[in-house]
Image: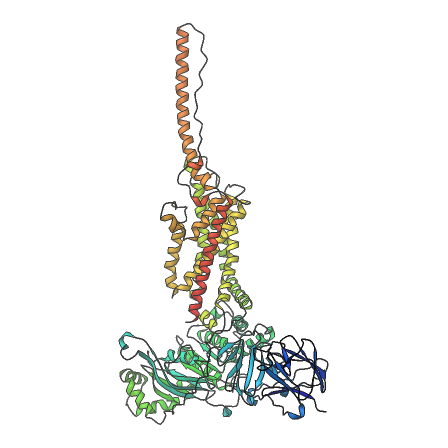
Amino acid sequence: MAGLAVRAGDRVVTLGDVGPFVVGRAVDADLALTDPQVSRQHLILTGTGAEWSAYDMGGGTYRDGELVQPGAPIAVEPGTALMLGHPEQGVMVEFVSTEQIVPRRVQLDASTGWEPQPRPAAGGSSGRELSQSRVIRVGRRTDNDLVLPDPTVSGRHALLAEVAPGQYLVEDLRSTNGTYVDGVAVHRQEVGEGSVISFGTAFFRVTTEGLVGINDASADPDDLDAALVVSQLSYRIKDRQHRASGGKYLLRDVSFVVPPRSLVAVIGPSGAGKSTLIKAITGKIKPSAGQVRFAGLDTALFARSLVGRVGMVPQEDLVHRQLTARQALTYAAALRFTDDATAAERRNAVNWAIAELGLEEQADLTVRNLSGGQRKRVSVAMELITRPDMLLLDEPTSGLDPNLDLEVMEMLAELAHGTGLESEGRTVIVVTHSTENLNKADYVLLLSPGGRVAYFGPPEELIGHFSAYQSDVSWAAIYARLNAEPERAAAEFAASPLRQPDAEPTPPPGLRRRPRATRRWFLSQAFTLLRRQTRLTLTDPYSGLFTIALPVAIALLTLLVRAPEGLLPAILTDDVGKPRSLLIILAFGAVAMGLVPSVRQLVTERVIYQHEAGVGVRASAYLTSKVLLLGVVSAIQAFLLVWVALQVNPHPERGVFTDLLTEMWLACFVMSWTCAVLGLFLSAIVATAEQVMPLMVIALMLQLVLGGGVLPAISSGVSELSWLQPGRWGMAALATSLDFNTNITCHAEVLLKRTEDAEVNKKADEATDKANEKAEERAEDAGLPKPKAQKPEYRHTVVDCATVKDQDPLWTFDQATWSRDMAMVGAWFLIYLVGTWIALIRRARG
């Protein structure tokens, strides 16, 4: 029995056996339309078999030029035509018999290994097969239409709605790693024939026949085109010495083709452009001319979407040495896989990478206890987590002895050829200075100074090539000739039969938006990084012990001041400044506890951060993990510092708002935490760890000198300069809680005046006694009775603190002043935090 179908332009979709059926602009509508005149849910069709009714949902539907009332049923049958959005210029929807249509299927290349899975219908079959479906659900879960068993693909990753032959509407479902069209992350976009859509490491090209998978390394080599094609690649930079010629060339007319599953060793003298070539292959730099294609894709345009398929191992180790190899790989999997990836999926990937690199026996050893070759294997395993199709390594054998050099080259050959456990093989490019084990490579690329190709081909033919032009074919002689005549060496290779013909560059995609990074979920990344940072902190028991002992030791140093009254007003004039000395020790201790541990944290692991940022780790998540852990440590240390200090020193019971312990802890905690973020800021802006230490000393001295404790910070100029130091405001909050303007500055005047008054009163006593004695003598001489003794007139000590000079306006004992002091410390916290975040973003860009 013939059913009913709906036609919109070139698209014809059957209604099936049962409704409802949605027509609208929403990408998950049964018939998705992109015209802005159509609302997200414009029409609802209900019915069974060939009897259907349409209901307008308020978007404006017209039949024969007349507006249909919203919600009123419209009987539809073959030949019925409705206009959506406008009676004449709207979108026409026609109803036809299913006998009049020929269903089209979405085609997937068999070599991808992924097949569309039919989606079970609720309450039985809907009668709408994938061949007639308007929406393809893409994801890792098995109930999707297109199932991609890849941990970099989210469970519900994206929707594809076929708009017309060779035309799709793509909508990303807030996936972790994003959906890309022609190398650009998209949220919702219409794509046409020839466009490349990628989900994780799965790439598809849009054709009029449907989606065709782009081959990867797991396919049969005989079915693959060249894995890597470098065509007439040039890269030059602006340089004063070469200004007239347009700049200095770092690479010039580099061309070669790498077959699948090959190991290529890149060698050459210093300045030959080896590292620049690696950057061009990974898409980190845009060539001045020419093109690099991997799997047929221009890496300069598709760099962001190829992150999971192209792995890069720099010369420095990519792992924290305090972790075990398994722990480091587990955190790497958590950061690279989707947020909904299960623990089992991450564990399986880690176990596979460990087995692939032969690290089973070393998996649970800390990285610091591994040999140089084993550490390099761990760094490579970090990149193998996502099973990339191409792996690039920059000087992996640097600093290794000859035996380890051979071990690393053999490992790379196994990775390339797929001779390891369950290994599918991949293209491996390795930059090396060592020429001892080039026979392990399938091809050798020799670059001459200036970035020209002096040789590309099998390693066994390299010596034969150079023997035609020079008698001494030792490596020293070859390199000497390359340095002396780089252009001639390149010309000789260009004329040799080994020279491959230049590949034709592929045209770039049409109109492209500016590439941008996908916005991965902040909380999941921050939580993973926080767990890793916590583990790094706790792996060293001596570090934890020092963290606890340091504030206690600083607090006990206050005993050296020998302040009899502690933080209370002094009794003796000589002791009046001792409470200030106690507070200086506490305030400077809080500053040092925050600044010193954090000042090297970012610069010492910059290589790790930059690499992780390249695979999607957000600067904000990375910074948050650091700041939160430093905050917890600062809170604990500040409490121990204040509590111990108050236990060994007399003190007032209350501050401005509440008990003194709470107020002083809050002030020390916020000040220490702010200085910790200041340390992160200094660590982010310097180039090396050596540069940050002088800055730390300067920062500490500024907090000490301009804090208002050692020297008064109330004179013009000095006062304004001190406002730029968080230690000044933290010290002010502490001094406010202790009412130092009254208990020190004013109390010093009281003690001084009291001493003066005591001297005056003493003299008054002496003068009165003498006067009384003389009066008694005169009375006795005159035979008169003893006169009544006169009492001295004493001076009573009275000091109006409001008139005392040199009081610090930031120490006024009231709630408003304390709140302002704390708010200013918080303001500097935010300033340093934002500055560090900006610096990290710039560092991530290289």
Q: Whole-percent x and y of residue 534?
A: 53, 63
- In the displayed structure, 266 sits above or below 638; it is below
Q: In which quarter of the image is residue 59?
A: bottom right
What residue occupies the far top of the structure in this picture? Answer: 783
Q: Quadrant of the N terminus?
A: bottom right
- In the displayed structure, 755 sits above or below 265; it is above
477 relative to 393 in the view: left or right: left
Q: Whole-percent x and y of residue 629?
A: 51, 60
Q: Whole-percent x and y of residue 387?
A: 52, 80
Q: Is residue 484 visible?
A: yes
What residue occupies the far bottom of the structure in this picture? Answer: 497
645 relative to 241 in the view: left or right: right
Q: In which quarter of the image is residue 752?
A: top left
Depth order, front residue of 644/617 = 617
Depth order, front residue of 709/290 = 290
Q: In which quarter of the image is the C terminus?
A: bottom left
Q: Whole-percent x and y of residue 593?
A: 46, 55
Q: Can residue 539 be seen in this view?
A: no
Colouring style: rainbow
Depth order, front residue of 283/704 = 283
Q: Give the number of marks.
A: 0
